[in-house]
Image (cartoon, coloured by chain):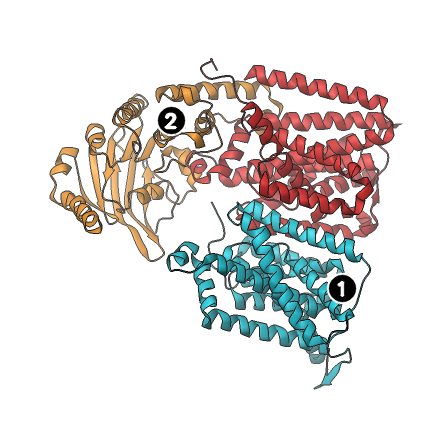
Chain colours: A red, B orange, C cyan
Amino acid sequence: MAAASRRNAIVAVAVAVLLAAAAATMSGYPVYLLSLAMINVIAAVGLNLLTGNSGQISLCHSSFMALGAYGSTLLTVRFGVPFWAAIPLGAVFAALLGALLGAPASRLRGIYLALATLGFLQIVQIVIEEFANVTGGVRGLTVPKPTIAGVRVSEYARFLIVLVACALAVWTARNLLASRVGREFDAVRLSPHAAQALGVSVHRVRLAAFALSAAYAGVAGGLQAVVVGFIDPVEFGVSASLRQITFIVVGGMGSVAGSVIGAAVLSALPEVLRPVKEYSDLIYTSILLGFLIFLPNGLVTLWHRATKRFTRGDPAPAPQGSAP
Amino acid sequence: MTDRLAVEGVTVKFGGLLAVRDFSLRVAPGEIRGLIGPNGAGKTTVINAITGVVPLAAGRVLLDGDSVSGLPAHAISRRGIGRTFQHVEPFGELSVLDNVLVGVGRHAQVPMAHAAMATPLARRREGDAVREAMAALDRFELLTYRDTRAAELPFGVLKRMDLARALAANPKLLLLDEPTAGMSESEADRAIAAARGIAESHDITLLVIEHNMRVMMALAHSVTVMQNGAVIAEGTPAEMQRHRAVIDAYLGEEEAADAAA
Amino acid sequence: MTATLFLQLAIAGVSVGAIYALVALAIVLPFKASGVLNFGQGEIVTLGAYAALILTQLALPYPVVLVSILLLGAVGGIAIERVLIRPIVKAPEFTLVIATFAIGLLIKGAISIRFGDSPNTIDGPFGAEPIVAAGLRFNPTALWICACTALVTVLVIAFFRYTRLGKAMRAVSVSAEAATLMGIRVERVYRWSWAMSTAIGALAGLLVAPLIGVNPEIGQLILRGLLGAVIGGFTSVPGAIVGGVSVGLIETYSGVFVGTTFKNLVPFVLLMVLLVFRPQGLFGAAEIKRV
């Protein structure tokens, strides 16, 4: 088991180093796109923990990104908090609201939970639009350029920060899934009765999943604000939530690898679809429907069928019969 | 000495239907009590009532003299009441090891922050948990299935897993719902021997629902017999085999089965 | 607040509520029969409005447009049920929710591409001249909407009570297995519940178009329809109507008392409160929460 996770760490570090090196040679726009892709990965990882692992449907994941984006940006704009503190604080804000929503919502069944998250999304959108003197309303909010100790952070440095954040997000998620926390998420989804009988508080676990996924979304939102330089509320509607759901459905629900694959592959899509931009939403939705009907367990199952591994956070433990 | 388990006048209703009527039961610490009765007698409902899965319309449940009735199910489990399921309720996508680890997890609490960062504390607790779980697997001869997804296993093996999982949580009182269903005779004997061994060495009290009379005779110190939601007799297994009302209850079931055939 | 204003607002509230009621009803019908909540229902209404636009532009008389939309709606519903819903009707709830959402978005996207976002309008069947009676002003289109909704309500309730298919649908909504054992063809019930649902949704589109124009955003009505369905309890036809009208009234009155900022918030806050404290609404069955 230790050998497998060490191997993963090496692969992850290698990928990160490669990306960093490649980005150093690339011009601004591809680096920008890579940053956005990695931000999508962070958001997808969070959503997968909630929906794929703890089994709770959520249509408002983009709202937590919004809360992180506006929260961190307003801290910077109004209180001068530097971005590297504001973003984590924004994530905490998002997590608190995630817990607030999760407390009652996680007691609800399927469609009622979906409705509650839909309601929450609408409320957040309306608050953003109506309190325009704070949030900039429909016209959006400009995000100050990030600085460290007064020095402007270069675009490449910004990329590295996103890279590190993405690596941390993936690493912490894998650790969580390989631990009691992840097991309880899955247990609560697979058999709440058995989980209860084993002393697991189903409600507390579901609530924790809400808060945790909101934290990841909050980080993603805060980073996105800094990378793009502007917050557009249109980015945080139902379509955005559905796009994130598409990431995890396409990639594979319940697995960090699935989140990464789904988000990475689909983030490339808007670029590929440039020439037919107006059809891109249509294509996204068709992909989602296609996967829901034909490959509901995502691309990661193809990989697993090839290598006969589990569909949970970690690859399969050491071969049978060996010492723990 | 206080009873390990005291069920006093418990009544359970589903809509207008009385599933369990004024049910009372006392089990001493270290005792192995059997709970038998024809199908539909309400045996599983009694377990559901004790573990807080269904609400009590009347009565109360005490563990070592402390009331647990009205507590949420997971809290009752943490007080020390464990159970297995008639249909196992496995975490199907998880491996057998992971299934049992959920049981162990109750006392291997790792704070989320530690788990997320894979701190030395987290790794140590996980290592301890895995060791404990592996020991449980070993006791029930499940090591070969360690990494197999529960959904792929035959029913008899799942029943063993359910036992291992429930015992891994170290309960004071364990309620077993037809633990040997689906097992071959030798499998059943070995599983019951393992369960009995653990119960005796860890001072775990058992309440066992069983249809297999051979197992019940060998395992239980005493037996409570139920029919139509109420107790109709109580005594040693041998006494129950000769008891008029018990024989009628089961004979009635046989006749009904014959009539339907 | 004068009595006149109060009544005028009531009229406005009931009129807009009648549309919400139709949408709520369209949502409740397939949910009652097959347990599928169509999150794409809003787009069915949009389709109805655009169909009305096209047919009106062809200079067809209103009754023809009305009947055509009902028929097209029904046919469309049967097609959707057969092609998109049947493959996933046994799938987990997640799949159903997301798939119906996605279908809705697909329809909205197709409409946006085909027609663009420019607003279109069509006229109501009775003109826009308000009818004045008893000191109150009545918008003829609004009256027409209320009349249609009332008629649909009566027809649907009669359908469930007196027709074989209606009774079959009630049986299936209680237990599909038991219904099959009784010889009911469950698939046929599903198909017709969807047909009714989309026909009513399309009708709502036709009815509402003179009031709010024809544009891809009509689908947002589903939010009010969903709230109406929650208030009514998801399995009750009269509940959906009462719920929808209530949403209309709440919206209209809160606009006066609360100001525009919070007026938009009221329905959603109400939704959240209901979901937390009384998800079964007024008339629904109680078992909503889970472990």
Residue at mark 1? C214
Mark 2–mark 1 distance (CA, rounded to whole Å): 63 Å
Residue A266 at x, y percent in the picture: 71, 36
Bin the neighbour count of mark 2 within 10 Å (Cα to Cα): few under 14, some 14-19, many 20 and up.
Answer: many
Type of amino acid under label 1: Val
Front position in the image: B182 or B196:
B182
Bin the neighbour count of mark 1 within 10 Å (Cα to Cα): few under 14, some 14-19, many 20 and up.
Answer: many
Residue extending furthest toward the bottom: C134
Q: Can I make out residue C247 in this image?
A: no
Residue A95 at x, y percent in the picture: 65, 38
Chain of the residue that carries numbered disc 2 in the rendered image: B
Residue B164 is tagged as 2
- At numbered mark 2, what does the secondary structure look like: helix, strand or loop? helix
> What's the residue at 73%, 53% (across, down)?
C110
Residue extending furthest toward the top: A323
In the displayed structure, does residue B255 sit left or right of residue A123? left
> What's the residue at 57%, 57% (across, down)?
C274
> What's the residue at 76%, 50% (across, down)?
A128
